[in-house]
Each structure stands twice: as structure tokens, then as C-alpha cells.
Image: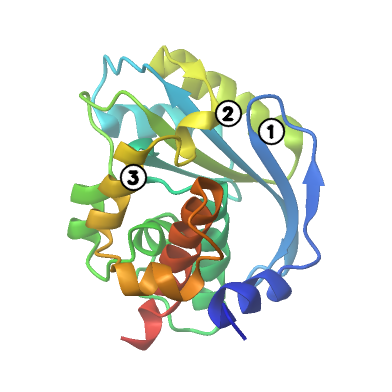
Amino acid sequence: MKYPLYYCLIKSVSNYSNLAGDKMIIKEVNLPFIDSKKIVLIAGIRECTLNVKFDELVNKIRNLKNRSTVVQFFNADFIAGWQHIFFSVINAYNSFDQKRNISNKIEAEILLYVSAQRQIKNAINLFGINTLTRNICVVIIADTIDKAKFLLNEIQTYTQGTLDDNIIEIYNKDKFERIKQVFNISLNELKAVKRSEEWADLREALTKSIISRAALLVSE
């Protein structure tokens, strides 16, 4: 099989549903560990202006959400598409389900899988956000679409940015090279999975390589 890890993950969450989203990605999926159907909302917010420290933003959102809701932020400049985030979420919940989690908190575990790092400090340095971050990716895991969208609207208000899911995609070659360098993806790795030299196939190959790399995190 050409992309064993990637397609294994696809198969493991084949029961997820695509739901309508306005400038955001919304999936409904039965998550492992909690064994419950959840809404996974993934969105990009561009041209942000964070007038508060990240800890303050987290505290504001924590006061608005219930305990079963999960929210995590990333620097969108290093995100290789919605699949990068979605399968990191699946991997994180799988790790807790199999008692192989690296972190004690699901939010941190998701960040580790997104960054393919075992150390949370390294993951934050690479993918965390701060007052200088202009493009943000957020994932919200909630019981309903309404709850997820409510939190997203509040986050957009706090960050003063514009919803734009395009910023979480690999939209140009500069971002492609930046991500390839951060994850240390070799040309041989891309060659093994790419179908052609077409731009769309190269982007897909990079995303698949990152997802496969992250899936191996617990085995390192």
C-alpha cells in the first residue's frame, strides 16, 4: 500500500460526517477514548491583532466553554491543511484510549501531534501563538455545532481577525518550503508518496508525509 499510515487513519475514522461550514471545516466524528460523537470545527483566522497575552485569551475562552469542550490554537503559518489538524485530533484521542498519551491533557496532546514533537516546550515554540502571530488556526471539539460556532465567534472577536480557512492550507510555495523545513521532510519522503509533479499533488504529498510522521510519535 502506497500510503499505509495515512490510509489506515482514514479507515479508522471512516464514520465521520462532513457538515456545512461557512469559511470553516466542520466534521462530526465518534472519537475514541471518550467514545462519544463530537463536532470537530477547524478554522483559520487571518490578520489577527492579539491585544492580550495568550494566557489571558485561553482564560477568557475557558470561562465560556464547558468541561467537555476542547479548544486549541496553532500558528497557521505551519499548518498543512485541515487534514493535518483533524488527524492530529484523532491521534491524540487514540493515544489516550490506548494509554500511550505523552501529555496529561488532551489539548497538549493534540499540539504534540500537530507538531510531531514529544516535548511540549518544543511544540509550543514551533506552533504556539503569541501577540506577534497574525494567522491563527483553531480547533474546537464540542457537543454541538452551535456551541463550536459560538466559541469561534468569541475567539474571532478577541483576536480581531477575519475568518479564512484558506490560511490553513498550503497556499503557496513559500509556505510549502517553510513547512517542509520545520518537519524536516526530505525529497525522498515526498517522492515516495507524490503522484506527480503537479502543485496539488505536491501539497497532498507533504500533508500525508506530516500525518504519517506524527502517527509514529508514540512509537519513538
36 left or right, relative to 90: right
Give coordinates of residue 9: x percent, y percent: 62, 73
Instruction: Return the residue at label 1.
Output: 147
The amino acid sitting under disc 2 is: Leu
Give coordinates of residue 138: x percent, y percent: 48, 38
Instruction: Return the residue at label 2.
Output: 151
**Residue at image point 72% right, 53% down:** 38
The Cα–Cα distance between marks 1 and 3, rounded to whole angstroms, is: 27 Å
Instruction: Return the residue at label 3.
Output: 78
Disc tally is 3
Mark closer to the chain start, 1 or 3: 3
- Label number found at residue 169: none
The amino acid sitting under disc 1 is: Lys
Q: Nearer the viewer, residue 89 or 179?
A: 179
The amino acid sitting under disc 3 is: Phe
Residue 182: name its quadrant: bottom left
Give coordinates of residue 33: x percent, y percent: 62, 73
**Residue at image point 69% right, 33% down:** 147
The secondary structure type at the circle numbered 3 is helix
